[in-house]
Each structure stands twice: as C-alpha cells, then as structure tokens.
Amino acid sequence: MERLEKITMDKNLKCKDCGAEFVFTEGEQKFYTEKNFPDPIRCPECRKVKKSKSNGKNNNKQ
C-alpha cells in the first residue's frame, strides 16, 4: 500500500519514444497502482503505435 501514498494530482511525464510531455492523471495513477503496473513511459499516441506493432507481430505467429 506504500504506492498509494505516491498518487498525487495529475503529473507530467516525458515520453521515452517521442519526447513529448503527457499528463498522467490522478485517476490513471490510481488504476495503475491497483493493477500494480509501473508508471507509463510512453505517451498515449506512442503506446497505441507500439501496441499496434506488437499486435501485428503476434498475428503472424503460428
């Protein structure tokens, strides 16, 4: 439960891929904490791109 104490108001993070700043909202922080996920390292747009690329790779496996 230590991590719950780290939840703050919205915070700005910097995307690992494109370098853009994006907002990690208080609600998102709570969701990530409940699921025991680490803070995001990519902005929503780069996450979509990464997910679509990885989904394409998974579809080719047989």
Image (cartoon, helix red, strand yellow):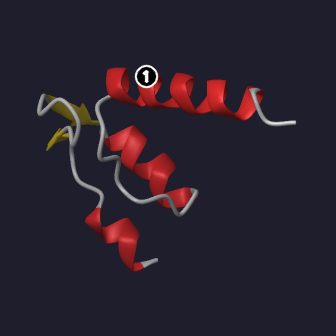
Residue 4, how many percent across, how many down?
39, 67
Q: Residue at x 37, y 49 (%)?
A: 29
Residue 46, how many percent across, how many down?
34, 27
Determine the residue located farthest toward the right in the rendered image: 62
Q: Residue at x 20, y 38 (%)?
A: 15
Residue 5, how many percent across, how many down?
31, 70
Does residue 50 appear left or right of residue 60 in this picture?
left
Dot 1 amino acid type: Val
Relative to 11, residue 49 above or below? above
Q: Residue at x 29, y 47 (%)?
A: 41
Q: What residue sits right under mark 1 in the picture?
A: 49
Secondary element type, mark 1? helix
Relative to 58, residue 35 above or below? below
Number of marks in picture: 1
Residue nearer the viewer, 10 or 47: 47
Relative to 55, residue 41 above or below? below
Residue nearer the viewer, 21 or 25: 21
Does residue 42 appear left or right of residue 30 in this picture?
left
Q: What is the crowding at mark 1: few (fewer than 14 residues within 10 Å), some, or many (at least 20)?
A: few
Does residue 5 appear left or right of residue 23 in this picture?
right
| Quadrant of the rendering where the C terminus is positioned | top right
Residue nearer the viewer, 18 or 9: 18
Determine the residue located farthest toward the bottom in the rendered image: 2
Residue nearer the viewer, 39 or 3: 39
Q: Residue at x 55, y 58 (%)?
A: 34
Relative to 21, residue 7 above or below? below
